[in-house]
Image (cartoon, rainbow, N blue to C red):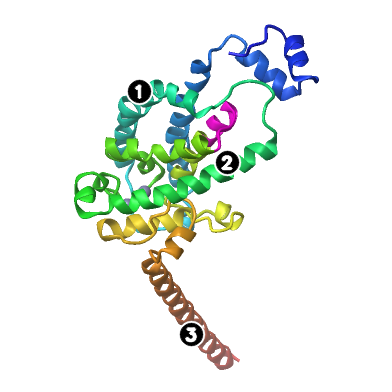
Amino acid sequence: MLPYATLQEAETAIGRSLTCAETLWFNYTANKSDYALYCHAIPLLFLPSILVPLLYVLIELIFPIASYKIQPKIKISLYDNFKCYLVVTRTFVLIVAPTLLVSYPSIKMIGIRTSLPLPSLTEIIAQLIIYFIIEDYTSYWLHRAFHIKWVYENIHKVHHEYTAPTGFTSQHAHWLETLVFGIPGYLGPAIVPGHMITFLLWLFLRHTESVEIHSGYDLPWTLKKYIPFYGGAKFHDYHHYVGGQSQSNFAPIFTYCDYIYGTDKGYKYHKRLQQQHQQLKDGLKSDAKQIGGSYASAASIKSE
Ligand SMILES: [Zn+2]
Ligand SMILES: [Zn+2]
């Protein structure tokens, strides 16, 4: 809760007029405790788990864009999507939401502030970049640990149930994995603490990114084109495609960790094979066209 009773009091305390965003924040948070503000994380995490995957399911049903599907031969039925959705919702209600409700003291300890002034856009973006880098590096090593035989067989196998992932499979995991992979999300804000707005935005973006890389679609507007070293859906899809034996593509966001530690060799080989296959297909098509063309010319000469 803000320590100011009125807007004027807040303006006097920070020594200038409030911006439009700060006035909105003041009005919105005036009667809300910091705990209530932190609890906004629950819908902000739940919405991407439901709405973003649903969008992909609708795309598949209404506007089938098979050319962008990473594994076009695999069809996930509506029933399977629904089954996966139920598992994800159960994990969210029983594990994620209660963990968020009791983890408030850690937010206080980290130093996440709710007060005025609000952070500038530059500060928010800089902190988000740092959070994504820390998340990626930590999750890379955690993910490698989850592929140790015993850990894989007893915990991580649940996340690998779908070899062709969809948005709903992003959170489809053993409860212990859900908890462990939640830690990197708090590590960045603990090292570089920011405002509650940045923290909530971070949780939302982190969750949405996870749904995107599991979507099963390599859409033309993917962030891969705009963010250097961003792995995207194709990069993580390969990790699921290989399954339990996968020793490739562990990083959830960027590609450089797998490049540095040599865990992208299988993926590179796979991409080379795909390119050769495509070149062969294109070559056969152009040969067929040429043959078709000469038949056509022969037919036209005959008819003359
Ligand atoms: Zn894995
Ligand atoms: Zn995954």
Residue pointed to by mark 1 = 98
N-terminal-most mark, 1 or 3: 1
Residue pointed to by mark 2 = 128
Return the x and y of residue 129 as percentages of the image width and height.
58, 45
Quadrant location of the N terminus in the rendered image: top right
Q: Amino acid at mark 1?
A: Pro
Q: Amino acid at mark 2?
A: Leu
Q: Residues within 10 Å of mark 1 (few under 14, many from 20)?
A: few
Is residue 96 something one can see in this rendering?
yes
The residue at label 3 has a CB less than 8 Å from ligand 2: no
Q: Is residue 98 left or right of residue 151?
A: right
* Residue extent of the magenta highlight: 192-202
Q: Which mark is residue 281?
A: none
The answer to which image quadrant residue 277 occupies is bottom left
Q: 300 or 67, which is in the foreground?
A: 67
Q: CA distance from mark 2 to mark 3?
A: 51 Å
Return the x and y of residue 188 as percentages of the image width and height.
50, 40
Residue pointed to by mark 3 = 287
Quadrant location of the C terminus in the rendered image: bottom right
Dominant SS type (magenta):
helix
Residue at image position (76%, 15%) is 11
Residue at image position (33%, 58%) is 241
Q: Secondary structure at mark 2?
A: helix
Residue 296 higher or lower than 133, as above or below: below
